[in-house]
Image: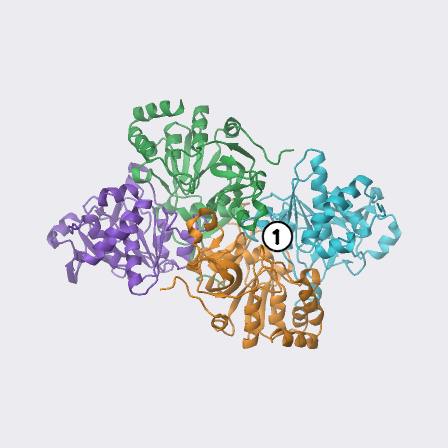
Chain colours: A orange, B green, C purple, D cyan
Amino acid sequence: MKSFDELSLKEIVDEVQDGFILGIPADYSGVPMKFTKELIKKGVKNLKLYCLPLTTIQGDMLIGSGCVSEIEAAAVTLGEFGMAPRFSEAVENGKILIKDSTCPALHAQLQATEKSVPFMPLRGVIGSDIQKHRKDWHVIENPMRSSGVREEPVLLLPAVQLDILVFHAPCSDRNGNIQIGRRRELATLAHASKKVFVTVEKVLDIDFFEDELSAATCLPALYVNGISIVKNGAWPCALPGVYSSDNEEIKKYSLAAKTKEGFGEYMRYCLK
Amino acid sequence: MKSFDELSLKEIVDEVQDGFILGIPADYSGVPMKFTKELIKKGVKNLKLYCLPLTTIQGDMLIGSGCVSEIEAAAVTLGEFGMAPRFSEAVENGKILIKDSTCPALHAQLQATEKSVPFMPLRGVIGSDIQKHRKDWHVIENPMRSSGVREEPVLLLPAVQLDILVFHAPCSDRNGNIQIGRRRELATLAHASKKVFVTVEKVLDIDFFEDELSAATCLPALYVNGISIVKNGAWPCALPGVYSSDNEEIKKYSLAAKTKEGFGEYMRYCLK
Amino acid sequence: MNLDIQREELLISQLADLLKNDKHVAVGAASPIPGAAALLAKEEAKFLNKRLRVTILHSNKYNNFTDGARELFDCAAQGRIDTFFLGGVQIDGQANINLVGTGEYPKIKKRFPGSFGSALMYFVVPQIILFREEHSPRTLVKKVDFISAPGVSERDVYRPGGPKYLLTNRALFKFNKNLKKFSLCKINEKETVKNLVKVTGFDFDVDNKISQMPNPDTNRINILRDKIAPMVSEFYPEFANRIWGI
Amino acid sequence: MNLDIQREELLISQLADLLKNDKHVAVGAASPIPGAAALLAKEEAKFLNKRLRVTILHSNKYNNFTDGARELFDCAAQGRIDTFFLGGVQIDGQANINLVGTGEYPKIKKRFPGSFGSALMYFVVPQIILFREEHSPRTLVKKVDFISAPGVSERDVYRPGGPKYLLTNRALFKFNKNLKKFSLCKINEKETVKNLVKVTGFDFDVDNKISQMPNPDTNRINILRDKIAPMVSEFYPEFANRIWGI
């Protein structure tokens, strides 16, 4: 039998159901843009985006296309090209719920699921309006006698489990192990997700585990439910170590998406 | 100026003071045996060994040589060669304090320090005699409304900071970054230690960060206080990916160390 | 080819039978027989067009993890490991296991290595197989001197996993969680129930359908000796040499 | 060579002056000026035989981390980062910063990207430098509309870090933790204290030793343009092109 499940992009898209919590990688971790466009074509609804810890054009497109009801993130931005226009518009007009967070909290909530513990403690944050508005967060007095400061307030964050994670990676090996390099946040995302699908530029006919050094660069196949070969799958975002972002295209998007009409026109061209 | 501090083995040994909490890597993570023998020669006293999560000949030798007052570990064993005789003898005769633990707890306590939080939660363990005897551990009812089971008991483990960590690695690059491959528990150990020293087989005249894949295999120099080039520094233990353990030598030790006299004789030969 | 089945081969075969529904089996420290059983089950699964992952911690080649030594425990806690093996200096009738030593802790009489990861794995892996070759009143006791990990837990404790089987040289027991008691289901052909009662330190039930441990068939023994033995010798050279002379 | 100092170069120079005692400076998202300042300080430290590490997250080459995106925060929490830079849509007189938007949350009027890692970094990095080019009553306000991270904390809150400086196009302020107030210490040569009072939305003290922002000397400007500019263009190409035409 085949040592991993090679899927079509459509088969991956079909795994995403309305209302799912979808894991969203940051712009430096391999944004699955081809997948995202197929998802928009399908017309999925009420997604909850969990960003680790931020999203750029991927989140903005999904929001602008009406696929999203809720987003948990530390930031939504187009980086050098300014604010994420569809996101800002949607928040300003109350179209989506934003659970404002901060980067380390987004990491810690997935680490809780990674360890299967109900919560993860975090320092900082206390006294911010982020904390004030998060009813799912909880502050206790440090109960430890042997560590920390006796009775200091400590923030507890809930374990969050993703329904599905999709990201783009340079390659897999012939056994379905995924090269992630030092983008180890992808491992945390995968550990905390019920299902994981990966689009890759190519499949290499080697076994990463044959060599201790290449083993160190991969996410083991045991966390991966299926792989699809998608050339240029992150475009116009970067695939770190493989290709840079297409800044012209992102700029074009940033200008078009300033209005609903401009966004609509851009998406018609881009989904063709 | 030099981009990292190259030290002699003696300079590293001199950093270890009586009473320090010393981080001990497992037999698969690069055991610094040459360093250990120098440490025994120096006659350091009252070390507290924190094993992640176990130790083999390194811990047994240090205990047999009277350098240790306390050890926190999930196991002390010579693996295929049976029990660790000096450890067993020392515990049976009340010469050292053993804080019995379990592997995931030893990882979690360092992860707490890695995140600078006062404690880390863990599931399992409750109802064991390990838990019963650990006065530094604490059980609370799950206070979260949005995660875990309401009011389930959850074990909290204290953050533990190591005074010093020493391990052996295949190589460093010219900037002092250390190749650890997928032995990522070494990163956790380093993050949780005030000072970190590494013995290496060699220094490569490259920069691991020049390439995303080799970057993924290293512990960044920013965590490392000094490096010493020590050929065969793990012998007779293995250096994963480089050389295997010398089973003849470990067997020889396991037989000799069965008695105090045999151990003394072995150490005289081995410290020569 | 010599078809005299060795004791270790019989045990490997028994264990492999228990792994047939698994997707991921993990094997911890100092476990050559469970390691061989897992690799055998993986090989046989291929013929049924099924995928069985085997993670053997003490091997580089069969270690699927890349997130450091903690990944085994995280992975198990996530519910991604179906079967794991645990041993014990002592095992008692409620499936409590003791890996620490005999005598009254902390003033211990005979000290053993320690609890390893048992205190988490026993709670989260759905099928824990207890494996202890020596079957005597010394190893299978009424009550362990130290509980490294308890066989059963209070209702409010998070515990998706726990003991399912206990295999020794002499017999295979199933654990009944509700009764908190072992039940004898298979015995070695050289054994009698009567003798087992004598050499077992705890009370146990006897299954209605009690049977003899079946010997591995020719096909299985061939796979084991031809394909699995060389793999085992990579990470347990002493064991492979002793059993198969390789 | 053109020695007319550009506005951005002056700011880079001001920031570099604040990094002289550091061992490790980290630079977060969308921060070309702090990034250039950190690299400049690192280059100058070499002449003094000192080692300054610079971690620039948006660069592969200057990103020292290998443990994934969380390592910045873990590393900072461990006390291994001496200086970090934060901005703000609004910054108020108690050094509270707002990165989320204006209007009353959650019914926000104008939405900005979000708080990023500020809510932890502000608590644990000993020297936080607030950097916001626009200096107006719109950016420097009496009270922020949303506190992404507070300038000061209650006594029982763990807080080894916090705001030390605020740099804008017009001035450099020092933050006094005990008074919970900024104090003006350097002003742009084109500025007066009187005008600063007018364009600053919050009350501030004025240092006894107030001085003009010094222009970078020829040596520094040469290093900046010859060595640092090409480095910056690796991770902020748009910025490097705009300022240095490369």
Q: Residue at x 58, y 33 (%)?
A: B5
For the question of whether residue C105 can be seen, the reply is no
Q: Residue at x 17, y 56 (%)?
A: C215
Q: Residue B12 in the image: x percent, y percent?
A: 52, 30
Q: What's the amino acid at mark 1? A: Leu
Q: Residue D167 in the image: x percent, y percent?
A: 77, 50
Q: Residue C107 in the image: x percent, y percent?
A: 31, 36
Q: Which residue is mark 1?
A: D120
Q: Residue A194 in the image: x percent, y percent?
A: 45, 64
Q: In the structure shown, which secondary structural element does the residue marked by tag 1 occupy?
A: helix
Q: Residue at x 58, y 41 (%)?
A: B222
For the question of whether residue A272 can be seen, the reply is yes
Q: Residues within 10 Å of mark 1 (few under 14, many from 20)?
A: many
The chain identifier of the residue carrying mark 1 reads: D
Asked whether C46 or D171 is in front, the reply is C46
Asked whether A100 or B60 is in front, the reply is B60
* Quadrant showing the N terminus of chain D: top right
The total of numbered circles placed on residues is: 1
User: Quick check: A109 left or right of C168?
Assistant: right
Q: Quadrant of residue C234?
A: top left
Furthest toward the front, the residue is: A205
